[in-house]
């Protein structure tokens, strides 16, 4: 049984990634964040980047470069009007860092998804039929979900 499992993993090795590679962006379906207000949005949703902390600059550049390289982030033209901007910062844990968006202000205007439990229930039903279940570190999985065009609003300096 173990040998069959290893052969199966080898056959579908492109479905897995390591620290040095990415699965890329999950293109369909795009995620949509529904807000309870209309355009023009309040100024509080157009927040500038946080002041740079010099010791974090290297981590920022490394994370941004990696996200761009894997097609998970793209630069917005300076001529493009952006309705919502959310600053990002570096969160450190032990000897690792990750980039996170400060979505607190945005969350005050977000309409809750009333049907999320249905989606979770469907996933649990599908998992109950599985022979093997692997755990997944979703540290960067969050960045792989493509947002609708207007929902792309994280900013950095």
Image (cartoon, helix red, strand yellow):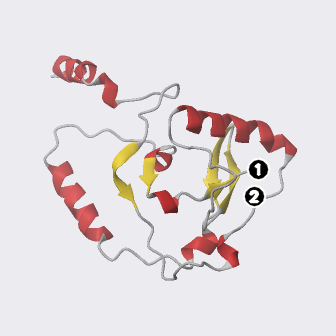
Is 89 on the left-hand or right-hand side of 12? right
Does residue 69 sit above or below 39 in this rendering?
above
Q: Is disc 2 surrounded by few (<14), some (14 to 19) or many (20+) residues within 10 Å?
A: some
In the picture, residue 25 is in which quadrant?
A: top left
Q: Position of residue 31 (x, y in %)?
A: 40, 59
Residue furthest front in the image: 79
Dot 2 corresponds to which residue? 49
- Judging depth in this view, the residue of 141 and 133 nearest the camera is 141
Front residue (pair 48, 107) = 48
Residue located beneath label 1 in the image: 157
Q: Residue 5: where, in percent of width, then height?
A: 20, 24
Quarter in which the N terminus is drawn: top left
Residue drawn at 71 percent across, 67 percent down: 47
Which residue is depicted at the point 36% across and 41% down?
135
**Residue furthest out toward the right:** 54
Q: Residues within 10 Å of mark 1 (few under 14, many from 20)?
A: few
Q: Residue furthest bottom?
A: 37
Give residue 149's position: percent from left, percent from top. 48, 57
Residue at image coords 77%, 36%: 58
Answer with the quarter of the image where residue 56 lies.
top right
Q: Distance between the residues labelled 2 and 1?
A: 6 Å
Q: Residue 107 carries which label?
A: none
Left or right? Give the position of 147 relative to 152. Answer: left
Does the CB distance between marks 2 and 1 fall below 8 Å?
Answer: yes
């Amino acid at each position: 049984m173990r040998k069959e499992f290893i052969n199966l993993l080898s056959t579908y090795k492109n479905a897995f990634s390591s620290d040095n590679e990415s699965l890329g962006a999950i293109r369909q379906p795009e995620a949509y964040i529904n807000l309870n207000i209309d355009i023009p949005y309040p100024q509080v949703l157009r927040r500038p980047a946080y002041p740079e902390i010099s010791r974090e600059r290297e981590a920022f550049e490394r994370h941004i470069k990696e996200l761009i390289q894997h097609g998970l982030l793209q630069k917005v033209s300076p001529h493009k009007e952006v309705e919502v901007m959310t600053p990002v910062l570096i969160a450190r844990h032990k000897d690792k860092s990750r980039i996170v968006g400060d979505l607190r202000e945005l969350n005050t205007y977000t309409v809750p998804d009333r049907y999320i439990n249905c989606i979770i229930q469907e996933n649990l039903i599908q998992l109950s039929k599985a022979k093997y279940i692997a755990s997944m570190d979703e540290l960067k999985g969050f960045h792989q979900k493509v947002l609708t065009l207007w929902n792309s609003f994280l900013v950095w300096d």
